[in-house]
Amino acid sequence: SKTTQAVDDLYSNRSDTKPPDGFCVANEIDPRRAYVLAHRARETLQERQVSLTIACHNATKFPNVHAGSTFAPTQNSRDCDAPYDRIICDVPCSGDGTLRKDLKVWKTWHPSYGMALHPLQIRIAKRGIALLKVGGIMTYSTCSFHPLENEAVVAALLATKCVEILPPKKLSEVGIVSRPGLSHWKVLDDDLNAIDSGSNKTLPPTLWPPQENSKSIIDALSNCVRMVPQDNDTGGFFIAVLKKIRDFPTRNRKQKVITKVSPKEPHHQLYRQDARKQQGGCIHFKRSPSSNQVFAVAPSLAKHVDECPGSDKLNLVMAGFKRSDH
């Protein structure tokens, strides 16, 4: 999975046994899928799991654990407000790129499916950008061919002028065939009739290709990566590599008085153990005061999930590696 590959990359080329400074936070909105991911990660990563935590949130509202930070921002960025250096934004999609292996898609797919997902995909991607440090990298990806889920979303992100798209590395050097992104496409209804821009006021204008006066966006879309099944004997994929160049403009809002409350589900809390019992450079936690299960968490990840101003907002499914039963 992308999650285990990200953690593996953190540990690549390391000669010592201490956890790396980096860590990985995976999010899954479906609790069942989140627990399946936690189980698979334990089997695959084993003790490297100390650098992984899994949360269960609506991605459009994923909490910023640095929110409320009193650290003074720099002149050119608000790094203290954005917690992540890299984000893999793999959004919900129509899945028509998986037609070869998932025959159910043939029965459920229709042209307006991608049209309906488009606003959600933009909201998720924008939330990812908001949580990304200035200068950080985010990949936007789907397993869809539909330009309304792919280039149309990327064009909307580029229009914010807060990100730029990076040209992909030469995939051909590792034997992967790819195709450039599209710059023009049609918006079709379920009867395959073209819908003209502006003719339907209920549809978001971001569905249609950029206007001719947006030449920089049109040119940039060629840096997107399209993979089609017949080129590599795989499924279909879309990838865009985005670099954050500035923060979104802030809106002036009345400051609210926030009362800190305990999570509704106590088993999503962490209880730090005696520092004298720590081993292997990790911090030890329990999921409840009466639990016998002890989890080892890398120091950098422990700070993220336990010490940041907004750490208590995280709805954790798993944090760290289960060390033992005491």
Image: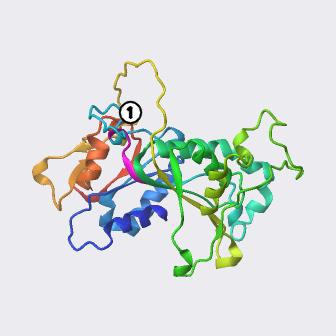
Picture layout, residue 229 above or below residue 23: below
The answer to if 54 sits in the magenta stretch is no
User: Residue drawn 54% across and 75% down?
Assistant: 171
The colour style of the image is rainbow
Q: Position of residue 296 (x, y in %)?
A: 25, 56
Read off the magenta span. 80-86
Quadrant of the image occupied by residue 160: top right
Secondary structure under the numbered disc 1 in the rendered image: loop
Which quarter of the figure is the C terminus placed in? bottom left
User: Residue drawn 35% across and 30% down?
Assistant: 262
Picture layout, residue 271 above or below residue 141: above
Instruction: Tell me the residue that label 1 is attached to.
Output: 263
Q: Position of residue 308 (x, y in %)?
A: 29, 39
Q: Residues within 10 Å of mark 1 (few under 14, many from 20)?
A: few
Count of marks placed on residues:
1
Left or right: residue 121 compared with residue 29: right
- Of the pair 295 and 82, the residue shown nearer to us: 82
Residue 32 can be seen, yes or no: yes
- Of the pair 214 and 179, the residue shown nearer to us: 214
Residue 287 can be seen, yes or no: no
Left or right: residue 130 compared with residue 92: left
Q: Position of residue 292 (x, y in %)?
A: 25, 50
The answer to if 84 sits in the magenta stretch is yes
Type of amino acid at the residue the image marks with label 1? Pro
Left or right: residue 250 compared with residue 210: left
Q: Position of residue 87 (x, y in %)?
A: 45, 53
Quadrant of the image occupied by residue 73: top left
Q: Residue furthest left?
A: 276
User: Residue drawn 14% across and 47% down?
Assistant: 274
Left or right: residue 124 compared with residue 43: right
